Amino acid sequence: MTPHPSRPARRRLRSLAGQLFAVQIVIVTAVVAGGAVLAYLFTADRAESAALRQVRAAAVAVADSPTVRAAAVGPDPTAVLQPYAEQVRQDTGVDFVTVMDTHGIRWAHRDPAQIGKPFLGHIDQALAGHVFPETYTGTLGPSVRVVAPVLDDQRRVVALVSAGITVEAISDQLRGPILALTAVAVGALAFGGLGTYLVGARLRRHTHGMGAAELSHLYDYHQATLHSVREGLVLLDGAHRVLLCNDAARELLGLPGGSEGAAVDALGLPDSLVGALLAPTPVRDEVHLTADRVVLLNTSAIGPGLGTVVTLRDHTELQGLTGELDSVRGFAEALGAQAHEAANRLHAVVSLIELGRHREAVEFATAELALAQQLTDRVVAAVGEPVLAALLLGKAAQAAERGVELVLTEDSRIDDGVLPVELAPRDLVTLLGNLIDNAVDAAIENAARHPGPPEVTVTARADGTELLLRVADTGAGIDPQAAEEVFRRGWTTKQHGRGLGLALVAQAARRNGGTVELGRERGAVLTVRLPLRRPPAPARAVPAQPVPGRAVAAQAVPGRAGFGGSRGVEVAG
C-alpha cells in the first residue's frame, strides 16, 4: 500500500519541531508586525508634532509682524499681505499662509481665487486672543493648521493668520521612513524565520521527528523500563559523575537517593569497584563485592568523552550456589574415592573368606565400619545443624583424601534449633566452607616446604548469644601487615586464585551482623562471630586471640580409611 503523499508533511507539522517552528514563526511575525506598527505610529506622531510646531511658528511670526498689523488697518490689505504671505510660505516650507479679517474673509491665500471668500475652519478661539491648532479640511484638503490673532498696540484683535501643512504633505514626508521601516521589518522577519527554521531542524534531528505526545509516551516507557528491570543501570558523564541510576543499581550498590550528580569516587564504593568504573578500557563480566552483595560488572563507553554505561547484575545467590556446587562436587569426588576404597576393602574381605580366615575377615570389616561410624556419630552428636554437619563430614572426607588431618574441637557443639531462622544455611556454607578450603590449601602448601603433618582445626559452637566458627591451620600464617587487605576482593596467596573466598566470608558475616577476626597460632586462625539475638553490626577484621582446648581429630591413614579416609577419632591435646 503506497502512503499518501501528504502524510510526511503532516508528520513534520505534528512533530515537536514542526509545532515549535509554527509557534515561533507566529511569535516572530507578531513581534515584528507589532514593532513596525509601533514604529509607524511613533514616526507619524513625531512627524505631525513637527509639522504642528512648524506651522505654529510660521503663524505666530506672521501675526507678530509689524507689516501685517499695519496692512490690517490699511486701505488695501490684500495688496500688501498677498505677496508677503506667499514669501513667508516659501521661506518656511508650509503649504499655506492665510491672512483674514475678524469675520474670516480672506485677504491673502495661496490660491488668489480664494481671496475675498470666507475661511474654512474655526476662528472663535483666535478672536478671543488665543493661538490654537486644529486639523481641518479646507480648500487644499485635510491639513494641520494653527490660527493666531493679529493684535494692535491696544491688544485688540484686528486680523487673523492661519498657517498649515496638508496631511498629504505629512504623508509624503513619512513615505521614506515607512519604506525603510518596512524593509527592516521584512528583513527581521526573514532573519527570524531562518533562525527559527535552523533551530527547528536541529530540534527535529534531536527528537527524531517525534511529536510532544510521542516524546511524553517515550519518557513514560523509559521511566517504567528503567525502574522495572532487575539489572542495575548507571550512566556516567565524561567527568565520571552519576547522570542516572535506576532502583536496581541503588539497591545493588547500597546508594542513597539523590546520588545523581555525585562523583563515582565519592559514593563510598569499594576501591576495586571504583577502579573498574574509572578504568578507561571497557570491563566485561568482572565480579566485585559491595558491602553485602556480589555483583557482575560491565562497562561500555558511550563515545569519546561522552561518558560510560555501567550495567550490574546480582550474583550473590549465584555465588552462593557456586559454593554449594563446589561442595557437592567435592562430596561427589570424595564418594568416588570412598567407592574405590570400599571396593578394595571388599576384595580384602572376600579374599580372607576364601582363605578360610573368617575371624580375621569379620574383625577387618567390623573395624573399618566402626571407624567410619565413629566419625559420623561424633560430628552429628556435636553439630545438630544438618547443613553444618553435612558440610563438616564432606570437608573431612575431602581433607583426608588430600592427606590433611581435619580436627573438630571437643568444645564444638551446636544443638538443633539454636540457630535463628534469619541465618541462611547458604551463608553457613559460604562461611565455614571457604574457611576450611583456604585452611586446607594453606596447610598443604606449608607442608610441601616444611615437613610435618598438615592439620586443620575447626570449632563450631553456639552458646546462646553468638555462633562461633573458628578455623585454624598449620600453614605459614598471614602477615599482620596484610590484615586489612585479606578480606578484600583479589587478595590471595594462591598462584591461580581469584581472591574471593575470604571476601565472601567477610561479606556473609557483615550481612548477618557478625565479625571476622584474624589471628595466628601455628598458622592462620580465622574466627567468625555471628550474633544470635543481637542487631546487625558491620563486619570488621581484627586480630584474634588463640582459643585453647582439646580437639577431636579425624586422622588419615594411607591405604586404610573409613568415611573420608579417616582411621578413627582420637583426642588431641
Image (spheres, helix red, strand yellow):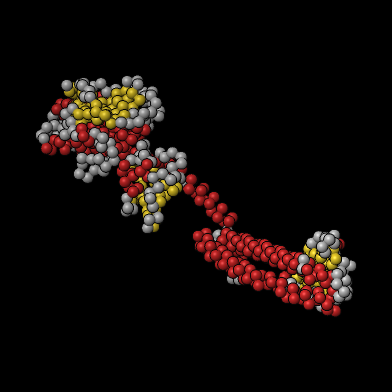
Q: Nearer the viewer, residue 555 or 437?
A: 437
Residue at left 59%, top 62%? 21
- Compared with 69, 295 (above or below) is above
Q: Residue furthest left?
A: 451
Q: Nearer the viewer, residue 523 or 380?
A: 523
Apparent side of residue 555 relative to residue 67 in the rendered image (left or right): left
At which x and y percent is residue 496? 22, 45
- Compared with 132, 550 (above or below) is above
Residue at left 84%, top 70%? 72
Image quadrant where one finds the C terminus: top left
At which x and y percent is residue 70? 82, 70
User: Quadrant location of residue 92?
Assistant: bottom right
Q: How many numbered discs?
A: 0
Q: Taking the image as drawn, is residue 142 in sight?
A: no
Q: Taking the image as drawn, is residue 314 in sight?
A: yes
- Compared with 128, 182 (above or below) is below
Apparent side of residue 186 relative to residue 375 in the rendered image (left or right): right
Q: Nearer the viewer, residue 394 or 54?
A: 54
Q: Nearer the viewer, residue 405 or 498?
A: 498
Residue at left 39%, top 57%? 303
At which x and y percent is residue 109? 81, 75
Image quadrant where one finds the N terminus: bottom right
Apparent side of residue 260 relative to residue 88 in the rendered image (left or right): left
User: Quadrant location of residue 425?
Assistant: top left
At which x and y percent is residue 569? 20, 25
Residue at left 36%, top 37%? 291
Q: Residue furthest bottom?
A: 113
